[in-house]
Amino acid sequence: MIPWRTIVDPDDGSPEYRAHVAGIDFYIWRAIGPRFGISARRRLPNGTSEQLTRSGDIEWYDTLEECKARTESILRDHQVRVH
């Protein structure tokens, strides 16, 4: 289970969710309307980073639960590749 920190966006007061697990930075936020965006990025030893979402940048979902389930999937896939 990913330990999420809830942060309030200073611009509009909406909640954002962040976590750092196994070298991956996860970020979930509510987009305009009912959708949620997710970003997952892994820092590389050379200082660059690798985007781990399928689209290469942001994936969109209808619920927060879908986003959190996708982050668990990204984490599992990453751990399989590393080990």
Image (cartoon, rainbow, N blue to C red):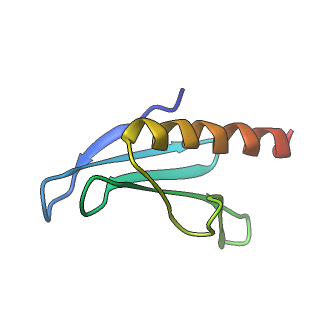
Image location of residue 29, percent across then percent down: 34, 54
Number of marks in the rendered image: 0
8 or 45, nearer to the observer: 8
The residue at 63%/69% (across/down) is 56
Image quarter in which the N terminus is found: top right
**Above or below 76: residue 46:** below
**Above or below 62: residue 80:** above
The residue at 13%/61% (across/down) is 12
32 or 51, nearer to the observer: 32
Image quarter in which the C terminus is found: top right
Image location of residue 21, percent across then percent down: 57, 41
Outermost residue, top side: 1
The residue at 38%/41% (across/down) is 64
Classify residue 35 as left or right of residue 2: left
Classify residue 4 as left or right of residue 50: left
State which quadrant residue 6 falls in: top left
State which quadrant residue 80 falls in: top right
38 or 62, nearer to the observer: 62
Image location of residue 74, percent across then percent down: 65, 45
